[in-house]
């Protein structure tokens, strides 16, 4: 089922079950439906960035190791 149809046919019970998921499980569900990106591309180095688990900001771990230009 695609994301739009799944959301269209969601009832309050389904919504309550989703709200009981942990933050990571909820994010995984959104990613599986294509509603949340699993990664972003760093403008600086072009590598994939991952979300910082604490506050959902995107972090480039490779950039920390590159020398300043």
Image: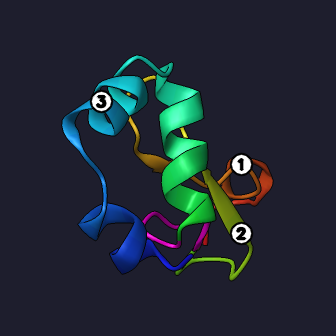
Mark 1 is surrounded, within 10 Å at the Cα level, by few (under 14), some (14 to 19) or many (20 or more) other residues, namely: few
Between tags 1 and 3, which lies in front? 3
Q: Which residues are magenta?
A: 34-40
Q: Residue at x 79, y 50 (%)?
A: 65
Label 2: state its secondary structure.
strand
Kindly report the distance in space between the C-alpha atoms of the residues bearing marks 1 and 3.
Answer: 39 Å
- 38, above or below 29, in the image: below
Q: Which residue is mark 2?
A: 48
The numbered mark at residue 61 is 1
Give whichever of 5, 56 is nearer the camera: 5
Mark 3 is surrounded, within 10 Å at the Cα level, by few (under 14), some (14 to 19) or many (20 or more) other residues, namely: few
Between tags 3 and 2, which lies in front? 3
Q: Which residue is mark 3?
A: 13
Is residue 37 in the magenta section?
yes
Taking 55 as reference, is 63 left or right? right
Snapshot quadrant of residue 3: bottom left
Residue 1 is at least partly visible in this image: yes
């Amino acid at each position: 089922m695609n994301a739009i149809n799944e959301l269209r046919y969601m009832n309050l019970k389904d919504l309550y079950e989703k709200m009981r998921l942990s933050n990571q499980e909820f994010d995984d569900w959104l990613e599986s439906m294509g509603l949340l990106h699993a990664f972003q591309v760093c403008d600086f180095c072009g590598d994939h960035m991952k979300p910082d688990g604490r506050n959902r900001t995107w972090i480039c771990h490779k950039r920390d190791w590159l020398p300043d230009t």
